[in-house]
Amino acid sequence: MAQQVEQAEYGPEPPASEVRAVEGAARKSPSLLDAPATYFLLGVNILVYALMVWRAHVAGFPFAASFDGQLLVDFGGCYGPAVLEGHQWWRVVTGAFVHANFFHIALNMWCLWNLGLLGEPLLGRQGLIATYLLTGIAGNLASLALHQDQLVVGASGAVFGIAGILIVLLSNKKLSLPWKELRALRRSVIQFAFLNLLIGLPPGVLLPMIPGSEVSRVAAPLTHIDNSAHLGGLFCGLAMGLPLFPRMMSVRAGY
């Protein structure tokens, strides 16, 4: 989830030649070679977290890591005043790779792993990374639009963005998978988005140590879920899927 302090020469593979990989992703053990972009994104997030643990001088297991707001800002958290007044717009990107605690990153990486293995065969490697970056940016911008003084960290805007684009692409009955299987996959993605949005409905509810929360103060970070970042990523993903949908069975260049 998002924490509130809380994307070549070769295009993506067309589903016409890769939809079998979607079926394989659901039926065989995942391999690094099957989904390199997914594992690349996981690796970047985990590396940033490990560096934060080292910087915070955490003794013992990373479960114990508890980062203050300043450390989150130092590592690129999307802090409203720094972005809007200090013009540090790069933070809307880097904020999607910063996490507030172990449980936060664990849940986000679990969701990214599952959705990435499903989405990478449909989007291609470049497409999945582009989706992560663009929807992560959209989520952070949506949060800043409503909470200009807060610090937003976490991959959940991007995770919701991948979910959004999959909801659209998995609606294509021309894919080689049986419609019953496609519908089941799409339903599971919709349920993921709905349940996580439902958790974030009560405004201002503080959920310390709950994965996917939003840290609201730099001086005293308290976690709560910021659905604005989730909705920003989700709607961006849905919008990105619409122009791809009619071209899913086209040649690589057209897709």
Image (cartoon, helix red, strand yellow):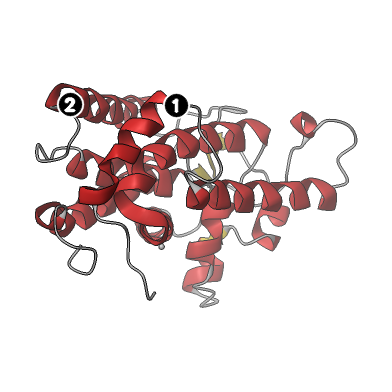
State the residue at coordinates (50%, 33%). Answer: 30
Quarter of the image for residue 135 reads: bottom left
Q: Closer to the N terminus: mark 2 or mark 1?
A: 1
Does the residue at mark 2 contact the one at mark 1 (Cβ under 8 Å)? Answer: no
In front of the other: 139 or 191: 191
Q: Is residue 219 visible?
A: no
Other residues around mark 2 within 10 Å, as few (<14) / some (14–19) / many (≥20): some
Disc 2 to disc 1, how far (Cα)? Answer: 19 Å
Looking at the rendered structure, the number of numbered marks drawn on it comes to 2
Callout 1 crowding tier (Cα within 10 Å): few <14, some 14–19, many ≥20:
few
Q: Label 1's element?
A: loop
Q: Which of the pair 243/133 is nearer the observer?
A: 243
Q: Secondary structure at mark 2?
A: helix
Q: Position of residue 207 (x, y in %)?
A: 54, 27
Q: Nearer the viewer, residue 146 or 64?
A: 64
Q: Which mark is residue 234?
A: none
Give the residue pinned by disc 2.
183
Tell me which amino acid carries mark 2.
Arg
Name the amino acid, label 1: Lys
Q: Position of residue 62 (x, y in %)?
A: 78, 34
**Whole-percent x and y of residue 10?**
36, 70
Depth check, front residue: 59 or 215: 59
> In the rendered view, does 131 fall on the left or right side of 205?
left
Residue 131 in percent (x, y) is at: 36, 56
Q: Residue at x 39, y 53 (%)?
A: 143
Question: Can you tell which of label 2 and label 1 is closer to the viewer?
Answer: 1
| Residue placed under numbered mark 1 in the picture | 28
The residue depicted at 32 percent of the width and 67 percent of the height is: 11
Residue 29 visible to the viewer: yes
Q: Quadrant of the C terminus?
A: bottom left
